[in-house]
């Protein structure tokens, strides 16, 4: 009834994004996997959260829920390391805890004995990532860098057996990781498993678990709420489809907006006055505006928040007269008006 990671293990790729409703056992499965890999093959793991303060809250009892699967062993955490303890007094170094914010400190470290990196809760419910609006792809780039550090050679250029697991509840499709790898463009509401070049995406909606929770007193408490749709029905918490989709009638191309390397097209419908933002842009259109300093170029004039064009888009959005081709376009615009 609970989560099983066989699909990920059978379709081995370096990066693996695992999403699903709450309480189905995603983290449990992979924590147990980390312990088994060490006990069976002497392969170590790295447990990851975004900030050191996030780690500090969970590391002391992180494995308590899976220890009933390993009667002869315990786990303790000391000075950044996890240790397996045995009934006869042995204490074996089995893993590390590292924050994404501290990845750059480990560029010269030796990780020859490590095969699994587990980033738990990689999608924050507050939508705040390292790098913020100015550097939205900082985290994916840090993770790529860290993966290469861990998986680098020792007799070959890179060890393909190293798995980087990104685990989360279904918070949002519109996140820096999915945008970086263009996963957000490929996911569909019915997608359960997506295999790309170097990555897997697994979206789990465990109906059996959802049904059990729904029939509980807690389930009755959250019935009909947004939280029920997120936690039980696997709806993406931060996403909604308001103003997604095109209007009818003729539209004309107004100008292009460049934001963190992506060019968005801004259109206006002739008959209704509705505005529309698309991630399909006319690259030859002469009117192009940048929204960040790093996007500023000879081809893209810097657009201030005080500019009439920006003020107009913000006004149209407030009046419900601005539509978006998809969630990526909506997320882009909502991020620049905050």
Image (tube, helix red, strand yellow):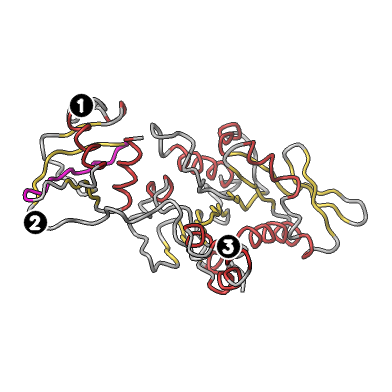
The residue positioned farthest toward the right in the image shown: 88
First in sequence, mark 2 or 1: give its number.
2
Question: Would residue 289 be visible to someone looking at this image?
Answer: yes
Observer-nearest residue: 12 or 302? 302
The 10 Å Cα crowd at callout 3, few under 14, some 14 to 19, many 20 or more, is few
Q: Name the residue under label 1.
A: 307
Question: Would residue 202 be visible to someone looking at this image?
Answer: no
Q: In this view, does 190 lie above or below 106?
A: below
Task: Give residue 170's position: percent from left, percent from top.
Answer: 49, 57
Badge 3 vs badge 2, beta-carbon distance below 8 Å: no
Q: Which mark is residue 335?
A: none
Give how far apart the Cα atoms at labels 2 and 1 are: 28 Å
Observer-nearest residue: 42 or 141? 141
Q: Is residue 142 above or below residue 198?
A: above
Give how far apart the Cα atoms at labels 3 and 1 are: 47 Å
Badge 3 vs badge 1, beta-carbon distance below 8 Å: no
Mark 3 or 1, closer to the camera: 3
Taking the spot 43% from the left edge, 34% from the top edge, the residue there is: 132
Highlighted magenta segment, given as a residue range = 260-271
Q: In this view, does 215 lie to the left or right of 320?
A: right
Task: Give residue 96's position: percent from left, percent from top.
Answer: 69, 44
Give how far apart the Cα atoms at labels 3 and 2 are: 45 Å
> Which quadrant would the N terminus be assigned to in this image?
bottom right
Badge 2 vs badge 1, beta-carbon distance below 8 Å: no
First in sequence, mark 3 or 1: give its number.
3
């Amino acid at each position: 009834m609970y989560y099983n990671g066989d699909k990920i293990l059978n379709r081995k790729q370096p990066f693996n994004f695992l999403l699903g409703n709450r309480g189905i056992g995603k983290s449990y499965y992979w924590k147990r996997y980390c312990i088994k890999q060490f006990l069976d093959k002497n392969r170590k793991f790295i447990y990851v959260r975004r900030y050191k303060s996030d780690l500090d809250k969970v590391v002391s009892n992180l494995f308590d829920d899976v220890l009933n699967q390993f009667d002869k062993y315990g786990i303790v955490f000391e000075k950044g390391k996890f240790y397996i303890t045995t009934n006869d007094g042995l204490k074996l170094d089995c893993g590390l805890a590292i924050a994404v914010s501290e990845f750059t400190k480990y560029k010269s470290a030796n990780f020859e004995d490590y095969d699994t990196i587990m980033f738990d809760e990689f999608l924050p419910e507050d939508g705040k990532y390292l790098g913020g609006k100015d550097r939205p792809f900082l985290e994916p780039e840090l993770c790529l860098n860290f993966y290469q550090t861990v998986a680098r050679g020792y007799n070959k250029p890179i060890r393909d057996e190293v798995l980087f697991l990104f685990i989360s509840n279904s918070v949002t499709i519109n996140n820096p990781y999915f945008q970086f790898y263009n996963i957000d463009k490929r996911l569909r509401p019915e997608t359960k498993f997506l295999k790309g070049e170097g990555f897997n995406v697994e979206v789990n909606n465990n109906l059996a678990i959802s049904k059990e929770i729904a029939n509980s007193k807690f389930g009755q408490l959250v019935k009909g709420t947004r939280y029920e749709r997120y936690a039980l029905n696997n709806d993406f918490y931060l996403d909604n489809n308001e103003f997604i989709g095109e209007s009818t009638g003729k539209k004309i191309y107004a100008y292009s907006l460049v934001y963190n390397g992506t060019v968005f097209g801004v259109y206006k419908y002739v008959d209704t006055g509705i505005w529309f933002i698309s991630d399909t842009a006319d690259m030859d259109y002469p009117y192009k505006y940048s929204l960040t300093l790093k996007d500023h170029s000879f081809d893209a004039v810097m657009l201030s928040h005080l500019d009439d064009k920006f003020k107009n888009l913000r006004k149209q959005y407030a009046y419900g007269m601005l539509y978006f081709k998809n969630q990526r376009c909506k997320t882009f615009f909502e991020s620049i008006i905050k």
